[in-house]
Image: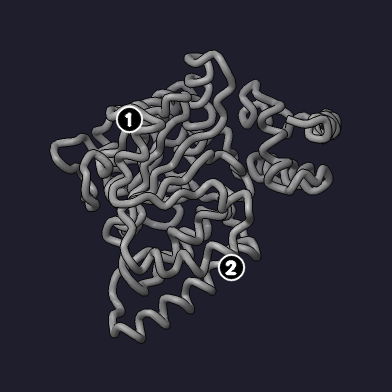
Amino acid sequence: MGIGSEEAIRQLRALMDHVEEQLKCTFQNVHQGYLTETLERFLKAREWNITKAHKMLVDCLNWRVDNEIDMMLTKPIVPVDVYRAIRDSQLIGLSGYSREGLPVFAIGVGLSTFDKASVNYYVQSHIQINEYRDRIVLPSASKKYGRPITTCVKVLDMTGLKLSALSQIKLLTIISTIDDLNYPEKTNTYFIVNVPYIFSSCWKVVKPLLQERTRKKIQVLSGSGRDELLKIMDYSSLPHFCKREGSGSNRHSSNGAESCYSLDHPFHQQLYNHIKQQAVQESSRPIKQGSVHVSLPESAAEGNDIVKTIELELHKYGNGNGNGNGNGLSNSLGSLKI
């Protein structure tokens, strides 16, 4: 970190000393004691412009207060059958840790259907995973490794990715924008595996639209990416869809490997049990059914440009091949601006 960076962090810290008390309270849940690293993330997200980073951070804190984000880990999705359906259609899980101690999150981009619950349920689930990562997983990793660990690694599985069905764009753009505005710079590296031809084709068009700092984070690997990923993590931390030499996976498991997407996986069991326990401690009343409603942001201009470009490219590809079924490609590419 250069002198200029240190001065920018110092100035932003001084500005944050003057925010109102309720914002300071929620800010503690954001930085978890790692204030410098948190200020640096928001500065990076606004190209080290102190004024813009300050506005972004204050807007984030106001969003947290207005939507009671600090209480999100006290609001379990019940009954459990609803939560299991969400887990089976919003494929994400913690498969392990890199050798440097960064959590490894696996995401089944191609096989996620987002068709078992309402938008509000999926948004609630996504924010709960973010909050559990930032308030439980990352602080625990920092303590274990004896240094600040404030980012993660994501492995995106493109198995099952098909053409043109753009029905999930709205939901994925909402989730992407929530992350972009309120959880910036939380991903150290994106590894994209099991890539079909259509992704490669669109990637060439989308890549120039991404900010340089985002492009540098993305690595498109050959096949399942196993050999490359083993350079940074042990075999036990590989996502289940990477524990094979060729490409391809399914939403549950492959070759007997445990799927980290499943509600039965230790990560999701710990997450769900934590939320239920916090709910009991917070209130003696029975847990209410129904989703939490969070104010949904307008998507950023960059994200809109990317989505429009992907849609045009997909329609051209679809018209040329006469193929109009499938799901999800535009979502996967559009979300890479985080």
Residue 270 x/y as whole percent: 35, 26
Residue located 55% across and 67% down the image: 306
Evaluate whether residue 116 shows in this view: no
Residue 200 x/y as whole percent: 40, 64
Q: How is the image coloured?
A: one colour
Residue located 75% across and 42% down the image: 58
Camera-side residue of 60 and 302:
302
Residue 216 x/y as whole percent: 56, 48
Camera-side residue of 100 and 318:
100
Disc 2 packing (10 Å; few <14; some 14–19; many ≥20):
some
Disc 1 packing (10 Å; few <14; some 14–19; many ≥20):
many
Q: Which residue is mark 2?
A: 304
Q: Is residue 128 above or below residue 311?
A: above
Residue 273 x/y as whole percent: 35, 27
Q: Nearer the viewer, mark 1 or mark 2?
A: 1
Measure the C-alpha gap from mark 1 to mark 2: 35 Å
- Residue type, label 1: Ser
Residue located 36% across and 40% down the image: 228
Q: Is residue 226 above or below residue 181?
A: above
- Residue type, label 2: Asn
Asked if the residues shown at circle 1 and circle 2 are in contact, with their CB atoms under 8 angstroms apart, the answer is no
